[in-house]
Image (cartoon, rainbow, N blue to C red):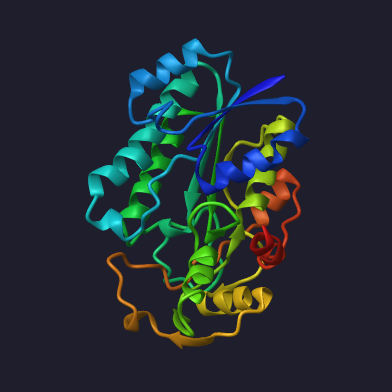
Amino acid sequence: MMHVLVTGSNGQLASCIKDLAGQYENLKFIYTDYQELDICDLKQVNTFFKSNPKIDYCINCAAYTAVDKAESEVDKAYEINAQGAKNLAIVCHEFDAVLIQISTDFVFDGQKNSPYIETDVPNPISVYGASKLQGEVEVKQRLEKYFIFRTSWLYSEHGSNFMKTMLRLAETRDEISVVSDQIGTPTYAGDLAKMILNIVSSKNTNFGLYHYSNEGMVSWYDFAKAIFEESNIEIRLNPVKTEAYPTAAKRPAYSVMDKAKIKRSLKIDIPFWDDHINNSIIK
């Protein structure tokens, strides 16, 4: 039996892990949110590892994800996304645990016009992206046994995400404008959770940095259109340019990621981005 610590347990990805946990009889899960474990406190993290059964894996789902708010809460974003990752890496090294760190397509500037590979040089254009990139650096500097998974545009029936925002807005509006010139890949958080748990359950040792998103590419406008079509919601949807919808943080214009490495090294199949929209809406 392997013990798996899941931080940020009330978030979207951790909630999807909880949904799937019963399928993995060889894994025993320990779920914590910041009330039980503040990853920004190194002493607390160390004490937690000491006072619990041997932790074999730590899946770090704790993150500061308020992209626009991060522009004015720089210290907080770095504290959680970088210092928190550093603390977990330090303690995972001490206790010989494998750390699974979740990162983002926002580490790139979006100036490329073909899918990003793992060896492309990051150049974040937002505080959020920069803080997540620093988290990657902290993990790489301290561990050999780690997985870093960069993912993009997470959606599911849990937490706060674009899909749920669109459905909520549609309850009170008959017209919505959505950005059409930012291109990326929506990723069902349940697919990401399943991939991670398969890696843990099989004790895969192909450690390193990987890109994982669903297959395909769309704009936010296309994503919204698919959500409303699957929901049978009739609403006027207007495509707009990024400059017509100013935000505090800049977003990459193009953030599609290449998944060849993860398919080859971890031997996985990846569903398309729209495979789970209907199920997510129904739930």
On screen, 58 above or below 216? above
Q: Quadrant of the N terminus?
A: top right
- Residue 265, percent across and down? 70, 45
The residue lying at 49 percent from left, 30 percent from top is: 32
* Residue farthest along the front direction in this orientation: 172
Q: Is residue 271 above or below residue 44?
A: below
**From this viewpoint, is residue 209 visible?**
no
Vertical position of residue 88 compared to residue 243: above or below: above
Q: Return the residue nearer the eye: 25 or 10.
A: 10
Q: Position of residue 175 (x, y in %)?
A: 47, 85
Which residue is depicted at the point 40% across and 32% down?
Answer: 34
Q: Quadrant of the rendered structure where residue 114 is?
A: bottom right
**Where in the figure is residue 101, as x and y percent of width and height?**
51, 39
- Vertical comparison of 281 with 86: above or below: below
What is the quadrant of the C terminus in the image?
Answer: bottom right
209 relative position to 196: left or right = left
> Percent x, y for residue 87?
38, 28
Whether residue 29 is visible, yes or no, is: yes
Residue drawn at the location 48% of the way across and 48% of the way down: 103
**Number of numbered markers:** 0
Lateral position of residue 168 relative to residue 85, left or right:
right
178 or 160: nearer the eye? 160
Q: Nearer the viewer, residue 169 or 252?
A: 169
Which residue is drawn at the image coordinates 68% and 74% (left, top)? 230
